[in-house]
Amino acid sequence: MQFDIQNMSCGGCVRSVTKAIHSVDPAAKVTPDLPNRKIVVMSEQSRDAFEVALEEAGYPATPGR
């Protein structure tokens, strides 16, 4: 699944977003695309669980295309 994270603008942001994703699923594969402010997550967990974790971490996400 892919998320657009508009306020992900630096390497520190990527680390924070990755940490939030791994708080839901430590085994998730996270592939950031910083220039386009997107992140791809490979996981069996629900999209909703990741959206909640990202929101709580200060990185609200919108579903990617």
Image (cartoon, grey):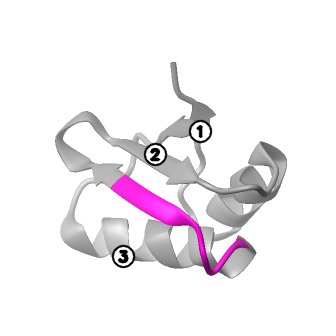
Residue 48 is one of the magenta-drawn residues: no
Q: How many marks?
A: 3
Residue 13: x %, y % from top left = 34, 67
Give the Cα separation between the discs numbered 2 and 3. 14 Å
The residue that appears at 70% across and 68% down in the rendered structure is: 56
Specify the quadrant that holds the N terminus. Answer: top right
Residue at which label 2 appears: 40
- From the image, tell me which residue sits under label 3: 15
Seen from the viewer's position, the closer of residues 10 and 47 is 47
The answer to whether the residues at label 1 and label 3 have Cβ atoms under 8 Å apart is no
How much space separates mark 1 and mark 3, taking CA atoms? 18 Å
Which amino acid is tagged 2?
Answer: Val
The segment highlighted magenta reads 25-31
Secondary structure beneath disc 2? strand
Residue depicted at x 82% and y 47% = 48
Circle 1 residues within 10 Å: few <14, some 14–19, many ≥20 = some
Which amino acid type is marked by label 3?
Answer: Arg
Q: Is residue 26 magenta?
A: yes
Q: Is residue 12 left or right of residue 59?
A: left
Give the residue number, with chain letter if any, for mark 1.
1
Q: Secondary structure at mark 1?
A: loop
